[in-house]
Amino acid sequence: EPGNYSTVTKFILLGLTDDPVLCVIFFVLFLGIYIVTLVGNISIINLVRSCPQLHTPMYLFLSHLAFVDICYSTSIAPIMLIEFIVPGTALSLHGCEAQLCSVMTFGTAEGFLLTAMAYDRYVAICSPLLYSTHMSPQICFLLIGASYVGGCVNAWTFTGCLLSLSFCGANQIDHFFCDFSPLLKLSCSDVSIVGIITSISAGSIIVVTVFVIAISYIYILITILKMRSTEGCHKALSTCTSHLTAVTLFYGTITFIYVMPKSS
């Protein structure tokens, strides 16, 4: 009976493990990763801002990607680190909503920025004579602004759906942060419509971004294969390697977390 349950106002994060030894190991490991992430990304931002030679569209996108990575990591890492020191860390419902909104905003913005960078590489390699026109400062800032707006819209969709749900009974989240799927399982409301809305929102973004990146690199590959100069081929490939690595890591992580079947 619904009346036998009290309304949940706090959630307990179960984290990655409850083994004290593993908690210490994971704390040191993830603290190190977090510090390296912060230092590395802050260094990238400072370098791009202070070096006039790096005031180009590619490095402008890279600096914003570094900023988004800092925000995304900071949305998750501090609370996760606290979980290792204080097992059973509790977050209020509003705290969970804020964390979910932040994670979705910057996670989605990262996907859009990687897509904008793929377009930038496409124009640079396939239409170099039109690069200054197609990647003017106005277009660059439009793409960057659209990335943040897209992130906000997707985050508001998820957060709005979460706000419409009621929580009663169980309050233990089997995760290291307030992700949407574990929260959905704890709701005592009908989640069918909410699940459809969020699936459409996230799914459409993934399909569009992956499609644009794939098409960009298909054209890039065709252009490289037509090049007669070996040096030109190597130069074109070198400009794409780091971006392809970032794309692979980003979508590989999404696939591992959300697509791969989970064991019991």
Image (spheres, rainbow, N blue to C red):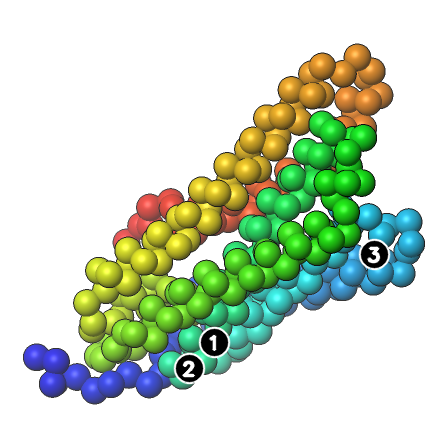
Residue in the picture at 47% in, 70% down: 101
Tell me which amino acid carries mark 2.
Answer: His
Amino acid found under the numbered disc labelled 1: Ala
Q: Residues within 10 Å of mark 1 (few under 14, many from 20)?
A: some
Q: Nearer the viewer, residue 132 or 52?
A: 132
- Secondary structure of the residue carrying tag 1 is helix
Q: Quadrant of the N terminus?
A: bottom left
Question: From what the image shows, is residue 207 above or below residue 163?
Answer: above
* Circle 3: residue type: Val
Cα distance between the residues tagged 2 and 3: 36 Å
Front in this rendered view, residue 182 or 189: 189
Q: Callout 2: few (<14), some (14-19), or many (20+) C-alpha neighbours within 10 Å? A: few
Residues at marks 2 and 1, CA–CA distance in whole angstroms? 6 Å
Please name the residue shown 52% across and 69% down the image: 102
Residue with the mark numbered 3: 48
Q: Are marks 2 and 1 in contact (CB under 8 Å)?
A: yes
Q: Which residue is mark 2?
A: 94
**SS state under label 3:** helix
Which label belongs to residue 158? none
Residue 26 locus on image (x, y percent): 55, 64
Residue 98's tag is 1
Percent position (x, y) of residue 130?
77, 34
Q: Quadrant of residue 240?
A: top right
